Image (cartoon, rainbow, N blue to C red):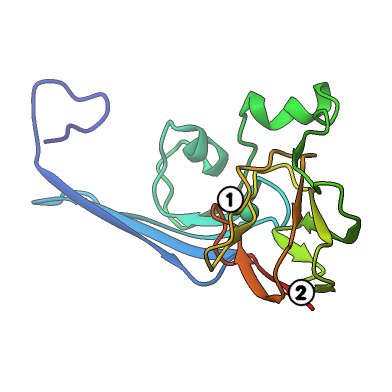
Amino acid sequence: MSRRLGESGKGAAAFAGGLNARVNQYVALSADAGSFVSPTVRAAWSAAINFLIPGSPHTFSLQASNAGSATIQGASQGITSPKSVLYGFEFTIPLHLSRFAPWFHRSPKPVALGASAGAAIAAEVQMAALKFAGETVTISTGQAVRWTNRDPVEHSVTFDGAEQGSPIIPPNGSYTHRFDKPGTYTYHCTPHPFMKGVVIVK
Ligand SMILES: [Cu+2]
């Protein structure tokens, strides 16, 4: 039940609905409409095209509506009941304090996990931008590989076979593993299974 603004006592049933459709990673369309069940005024509608600004937490949308309202969005489009379609835009700035945390913290202390057990580190693999950079490395039996996490998120080196893998590797952490048997060791990251790599031990 809904009542028209400024009128008291009298209730009136209304129905409304909306939809949001994602076109691709960066673009979405949204629309809604509402009307009283036995309308004495026009149905209200609005439509918008929304853009996610790549590499940022912000969205920008272009909006059109025939409805005035006292919301922030409505105020940007005009409060008085318009006779025609009004257009507006919206720019969102999500405020999560944690988003700004990197400004106030130095990069975390390096943590070294695993051990080369006296073996030479024959290959370095960077974990950066959710990828193992150096997807395939080739070493000799008895040598070690060191992985270093350059991302702000945790990764792991988890072997697809029986080989013991790493614990969770924090940002700026590294993991060293010695390979004692020849073979092809495929591995992935447990938090991000799409991250994949191979160590070939000859
Ligand atoms: Cu990962």
> Where does the image place residue 95, in percent across and percent down from the top left?
62, 29
Q: Which residue is mark 1?
A: 88
Q: Which mark is residue 201?
A: 2
Q: Is residue 136 left or right of residue 11?
A: right
User: How would you rate the neighbour count of disc 1 (Cα within 10 Å): few for under 14, some for 14-19, many for 20 or more?
Assistant: some
- Residue 2 to residue 129: above or below: above
> Where does the image place residue 29, in percent across and percent down from the top left?
47, 65
Q: Is residue 14 left or right of residue 71?
A: left
Disc 2 element? strand
Q: Tell me which label, 1 or 2, sits earlier in the chain.
A: 1
Residue at the location (82% across, 69% down)? 134
Residue at the location (86% across, 47% down)? 118
User: How would you rate the neighbour count of disc 2 (Cα within 10 Å): few for under 14, some for 14-19, many for 20 or more?
Assistant: some
Work out whether residue 160 or residue 87 is closer to the camera in this orientation and state it. 160
User: Which amino acid, mark 2?
Assistant: Val
- Separation (CA) of disc 1 from disc 2: 61 Å
- Indicate yes or no: mark 1 CB to ligand 1 under 8 Å: no
Work out whether residue 123 or residue 83 is closer to the camera in this orientation and state it. 123
